[in-house]
Image (cartoon, rainbow, N blue to C red):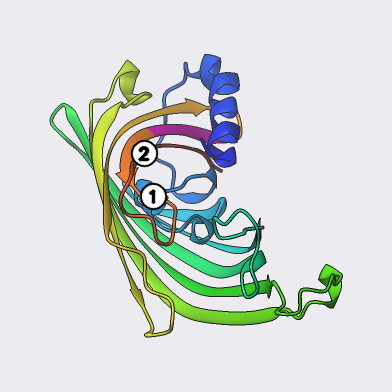
């Protein structure tokens, strides 16, 4: 479970006892802390902003925008599976991933008899750079300090466009304040032709349980989602299915 899901679920626990007031279709601004749209769980993690701002343009129609800048560093010491490092073996590798991304989403919802239907679409522009710093065992067997061994630096970068779509069929309960539903999300990505491949297309069935509460100065929607997908949140993984747990806290003013 991601940190943003834990934070949002904690808010769910704290605010759930307040769920006694009727929700209202407000026209105005809002903010989402955590996951703002199901389909963005399928994008690479660093392209999904943890905070977005948006506007409800009409009852059942809203748009939101967010940005994220992230640097992640991974260290790996390896002998490439040999009992002892041999000349030319990589014994140290440091990978630094830098992402600058902006995401835009739109959501439409409405009632169809006793059901509530919603459709969400997102796009994200993702500037990604990967720098790999490595050191190899020197040919000279004489002892040498690691700091004296030359470092090989390789930098690759690419720009990606991610697009996703999700739909939910929900059953409103408790006067519409709670609406558990089943949904399906999908995503695909394209690259600018650089040296890094785009993530594979993905899809995810999920369960969504949003609850809306009315506070004196704001309306709060708490949305917890549980799904299953292959490689969700990664740039390359596409083989293994794993659970996806996300949550978002939406505050409308």
In the picture, the quarter occupied by the C terminus is: top right
Q: Position of residue 220 (x, y in %)?
A: 51, 33
Q: Are marks 1 and 2 in contact (CB under 8 Å)?
A: yes
Mark 1 or mark 2: whose residue is earlier in sequence: 1
Q: Which mark is residue 242?
A: 2
Q: Position of residue 106 (x, y in %)?
A: 35, 57
Residue 215 visible to the viewer: no
Q: CA distance from mark 1 to mark 2?
A: 8 Å
Residue 218 located left or right of residue 111: right
User: How many numbered circles are shown?
Assistant: 2
Q: Quadrant of residue 98?
A: bottom right
Residue 90 visible to the viewer: yes
Q: Secondary structure at mark 1?
A: loop
Q: Position of residue 60 (x, y in %)?
A: 31, 46
Spot the residue most to the left: 113
Q: Position of residue 239 (x, y in %)?
A: 30, 50
Residue stretch rendered in magenta on the structure? 218-225
Q: Is residue 13 magenta?
A: no
Bin the neighbour count of mark 1 within 10 Å (Cα to Cα): few under 14, some 14-19, many 20 and up: many
Q: Which mark is residue 232?
A: 1
């Amino acid at each position: 479970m991601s940190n943003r899901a834990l934070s949002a679920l904690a808010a769910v626990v704290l605010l759930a006892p307040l769920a006694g007031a009727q929700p209202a279709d407000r026209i105005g601004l809002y903010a989402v802390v955590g996951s703002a749209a199901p389909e963005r769980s399928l994008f690479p993690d660093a392209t999904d902003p943890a905070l977005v701002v948006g506007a409800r343009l009409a009852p059942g129609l809203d748009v939101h925008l967010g940005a994220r800048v992230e640097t992640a560093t991974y260290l790996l010491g390896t002998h490439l599976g040999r009992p002892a490092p041999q000349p030319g073996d990589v014994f140290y590798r440091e990978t630094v991933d830098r992402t600058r991304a902006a995401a835009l989403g739109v959501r439409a919802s409405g009632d169809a008899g006793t059901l509530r239907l919603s459709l969400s679409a997102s796009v994200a522009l993702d500037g990604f750079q990967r720098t790999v710093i490595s050191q190899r065992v020197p040919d000279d067997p004489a002892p040498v300090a690691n700091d004296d061994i030359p470092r090989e630096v390789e930098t690759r970068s690419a720009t990606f466009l991610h697009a996703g779509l999700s739909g939910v069929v929900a059953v409103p309960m408790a006067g519409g304040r709670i609406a558990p539903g089943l949904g399906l999300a999908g995503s695909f990505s394209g690259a600018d032709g650089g040296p890094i491949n785009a993530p594979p297309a993905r899809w995810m069935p999920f369960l969504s349980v949003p609850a809306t509460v009315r506070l004196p100065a704001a309306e709060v929607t708490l949305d917890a989602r549980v799904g299953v997908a292959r490689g969700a949140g990664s740039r390359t993984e596409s083989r293994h299915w794993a659970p996806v747990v996300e949550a978002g806290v939406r505050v409308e003013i």
